[in-house]
């Protein structure tokens, strides 16, 4: 199939954060990161790694993407905070994002970041991160990073 003949369901939803907050057809809650467990890439996220970044993010500014694709914003993270387990998130999906998620997704979560401080290698301990985005993914780097609640 040529790029001009793509399946309409594969097109990027139109980014519209206000629609993600108002009238969303699906809300999700889960963990985008789990502390103290090595991921498939050899990284271990330490508690407190997101503290500074979360304090600097404006409410409603953290995008929810499909498969880390910046052209496929499918919602907005409405809550993100560290707890004893990891980085807990709640997000509202756009109607387009909800349809895509219901059709082709198995509950994995991931996040985009920049490393500010780390120690060691394999496993590398991630001590301070800049959180850039959260994504619904088919295969998360951390197997336990997934949705535990859907509504809508």
Image (spheres, rainbow, N blue to C red):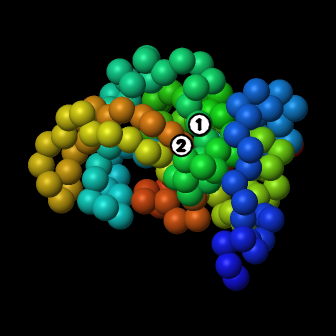
SS at circle 2:
strand
Within the image, what quadrant is residue 10 found in?
bottom right
Q: Which mark is residue 134?
A: 2
Residue 43 position, x and y percent, is 28, 53
Q: Residue at x 56, y 57 (%)?
A: 67
SS at circle 1:
strand
Q: Are marks 2 and 1 in contact (CB under 8 Å)?
A: yes
Q: Residue at x 54, y 18 (%)?
A: 58
The residue closer to the viewer here, 72 or 150, is 72
Give the CA separation, mark 2 to mark 1.
6 Å
Q: On the rendered image, what quadrant is the C terminus found in?
A: top right
Instruction: Report if residue 24 is visible in the image.
Output: yes
Question: Which mark is nearer the camera, 2 or 1?
Answer: 1
Residue 125 position, x and y percent, is 22, 45
Q: Residue at x 69, y 63 (%)?
A: 105
118, above or below 139, in the image: above
Q: Which mark is residue 63?
A: 1
Instruction: Report if residue 147 is visible in the image.
Output: no
Within the image, what quadrant is residue 151 found in?
top right
Is 63 displayed left or right of 151 in the figure?
A: left
Residue 5 position, x and y percent, is 75, 74
64, above or below 40, in the image: above
Q: On the rendered image, what quadrant is the N terminus found in?
A: bottom right
Extreme front residue here? 4
Q: Residue at x 31, y 61 (%)?
A: 41
Residue 64 position, x and y percent, is 61, 41
Within the image, what quadrant is residue 59 found in?
top right
């Amino acid at each position: 199939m040529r790029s001009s003949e793509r399946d309409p369901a594969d097109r990027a939803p139109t980014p519209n954060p206000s629609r993600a907050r108002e009238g969303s057809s699906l809300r999700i809650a889960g963990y985008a990161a789990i502390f103290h467990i090595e991921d498939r890439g050899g990284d271990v996220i330490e508690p407190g790694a997101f503290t500074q970044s979360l304090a600097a993010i404006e409410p409603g500014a953290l995008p929810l993407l499909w498969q880390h694709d910046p052209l496929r914003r499918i919602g907005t993270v409405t809550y993100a905070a560290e707890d004893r387990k990891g980085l807990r998130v709640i997000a509202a999906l756009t109607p387009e994002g909800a349809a895509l998620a219901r059709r082709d997704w198995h509950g994995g979560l991931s996040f985009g970041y920049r490393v500010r401080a780390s120690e060691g290698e394999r496993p590398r301990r991630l001590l301070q991160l800049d959180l850039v985005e959260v994504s619904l993914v088919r295969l998360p780097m951390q197997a336990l990073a997934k949705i535990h609640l859907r509504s809508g």
